[in-house]
Amino acid sequence: MASRIFTWSPASTHLFTDVVEGVTDPEVFDAIKALKEAGIVKGNPDGSYGIDTPINRAATATILIRAFYADVNLD
């Protein structure tokens, strides 16, 4: 029975510990996935994205600078 319950792969459904495909809003999941793949966001040291955590000025500046220099279309 346990084999039927645990058939998903965490690597394929988790971008971060708090951003999970099928749980996180699909639009938010896709946006965070695009930002992660572009190297604009890297997450927290504990493996989370901090989706419910307010962002500070330093993190905002880091994201803006990475986005400015990234060669990615985020439409």
Image (cartoon, grey):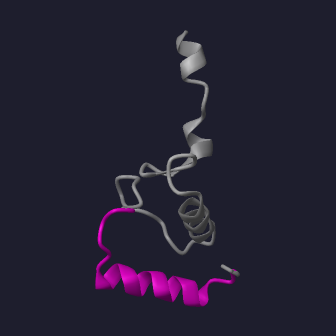
Residue at x-position 55% and y-position 39%: 10
Residue at x-position 41% and y-position 60%: 49
Where residue 60 appears, as percent x and y from the top left, is: 38, 83
Residue at x-position 39% and y-position 62%: 51
Where residue 22 appears, as percent x and y from the top left, is: 57, 46
Residue 16 falls inside the magenta stretch: no
Where residue 58 appears, as percent x and y from the top left, is: 32, 83
Q: Is residue 48 left or right of residue 31?
A: left
Figure label count: 0
Q: Which quarter of the rendering shows the C terminus?
A: bottom right
Q: Quadrant of the rendered structure where residue 9 is? A: top right
Residue at x-position 56% and y-position 84%: 67
Q: Which quarter of the rendering shows the N terminus?
A: top right
Q: Is residue 38 above or below residue 47?
A: below
Q: Is residue 24 left or right of residue 55?
A: right
Q: Which residue range is magenta in the image?
A: 51-72
Residue located farthest toward the top when viewing the structure as drawn: 1
Residue 60 falls inside the magenta stretch: yes
Q: Is residue 42 left or right of residue 54?
A: right
